[in-house]
Image (cartoon, helix red, strand yellow):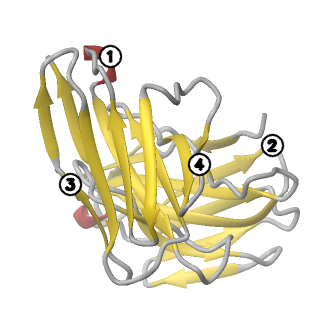
């Protein structure tokens, strides 16, 4: 079946440093979405990428969709304690029926002050 | 942004009882709602897809007779965990997708933490 993998599973970051989390799909995606879930909270939509090679920025967050539409990345610069949480990528596989959003396993981000 | 509510936010019940969880889209019409469960430190596992006015579509391995889903209106879907057992204890999250497009973002409810004793 279609799988979406995220690496790393855990990311320990010193406050002020940059880091990147990666998302890889076994099949081509129609789009990729990113969500953030704070500890004890629920996933909150961050952004959607649709076009091959698309890059979008939200303040210190940069999202990229791969040329083949099978991978994506999230880069955070100057990490802050407010960035703590689990970041999930999720995508709609092009060839799958039912239009179901498939979630990656998430990258749990811990920030050391 | 769109708001989705869930009720209750947490529930503790005895083994063998049934628990109903409500999911409401407060400021938009949701043609499709999704039910997920999430175990600690794990990803979201899709349980079923619920379309207004029709039967829910369950994922493989999810018992439809145990997890009853009703999507009676464009703003309300309910999940009933029947004859709950301790292994059903989990975080249940619903999400809703609006009329704008099938590939649009999903708006998640705050989740319901179920503990079965």
The residue indicated by pointer 1 is: B87
Q: Position of residue A29 (x, y in %)?
A: 79, 59
Determine the CA span between mark 2 and mark 4: 30 Å
Q: State the residue position of label 2.
A: A26
Q: Are marks 2 and 4 in contact (CB under 8 Å)?
A: no
Q: Chain of mark 2?
A: A
Label 1's element? helix
Q: Secondary structure at mark 4?
A: loop
Marks 1 and 4 belong to one chain: yes
Discs 4, 3 touching: Cβ within 8 Å: no
> In which quadrant is the C terminus of chain A drawn?
bottom left
Q: Quadrant of residue A47?
A: bottom right
Is the residue at mark 3 from the same chain as the one at mark 1?
Answer: yes
- The front one of A20 and B66 is B66
Q: Earlier in the sequence, mark 4 or mark 3?
A: 3
In the rendered view, does B12 fall on the left or right side of B92? left
Give the image quarter of residue A78: bottom left
A8 sits left or right of B88 in the view:
right
- Which corner quadrant of the image does residue B108 belong to? bottom left
Q: Which residue is mark 4?
A: B55
Tell me the CA gap for discs 3 and 1. Answer: 21 Å
Q: Separation of disc 2 and disc 3 at Cα?
A: 36 Å
- Residue at which label 3 appears: B7
Find numbered disc 2 in the image and state the secondary structure of the residue it sits on. Answer: loop
Q: In front of the other: label 2 or label 3?
A: 3
Tell me if mark 4 has few (under 14), some (14-19) or many (20+) residues whose alpha carbon lies within 10 angstroms of its own: few
Mark 2 on the same chain as mark 4: no
Residue A28 percent location from the top left of the image: 85, 55
Residue B113 at what x, y percent from top left? 22, 39
B66 over A76 or under it: above or below: above
Mark 1 touches mark 4? (CB < 8 Å): no
């Amino acid at each position: 079946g279609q799988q979406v993998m995220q690496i790393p599973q855990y990311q320990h970051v010193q406050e002020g440093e940059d880091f990147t989390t990666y998302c890889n799909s076994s099949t081509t995606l129609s789009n990729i979405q990113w969500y953030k879930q704070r500890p004890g909270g629920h996933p909150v939509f961050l952004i959607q990428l649709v076009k091959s090679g698309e890059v979008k920025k939200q303040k210190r967050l940069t999202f990229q969709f791969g040329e083949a539409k099978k991978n994506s990345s999230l880069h955070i610069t100057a990490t802050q304690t407010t960035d703590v949480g689990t970041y999930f990528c999720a995508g709609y596989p092009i060839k799958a029926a039912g239009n179901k959003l498939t979630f990656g396993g998430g990258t749990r981000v811990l920030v050391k002050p | 942004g769109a708001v989705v509510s869930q009720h209750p936010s947490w529930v503790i019940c005895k083994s063998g009882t049934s628990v109903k969880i409500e999911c409401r889209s407060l400021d938009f019409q949701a043609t499709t709602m999704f039910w997920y469960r999430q175990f600690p430190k794990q990803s979201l596992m899709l349980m079923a897809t619920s379309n207004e006015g029709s039967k829910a579509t369950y994922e493989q391995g999810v018992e439809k007779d145990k997890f009853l889903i009703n999507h009676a209106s464009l703003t309300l879907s309910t999940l009933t965990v029947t004859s709950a057992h301790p292994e059903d204890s989990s975080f249940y999250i619903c999400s809703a997708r609006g009329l704008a497009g099938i590939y649009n973002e999903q708006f998640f409810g705050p989740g319901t933490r179920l503990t079965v004793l």
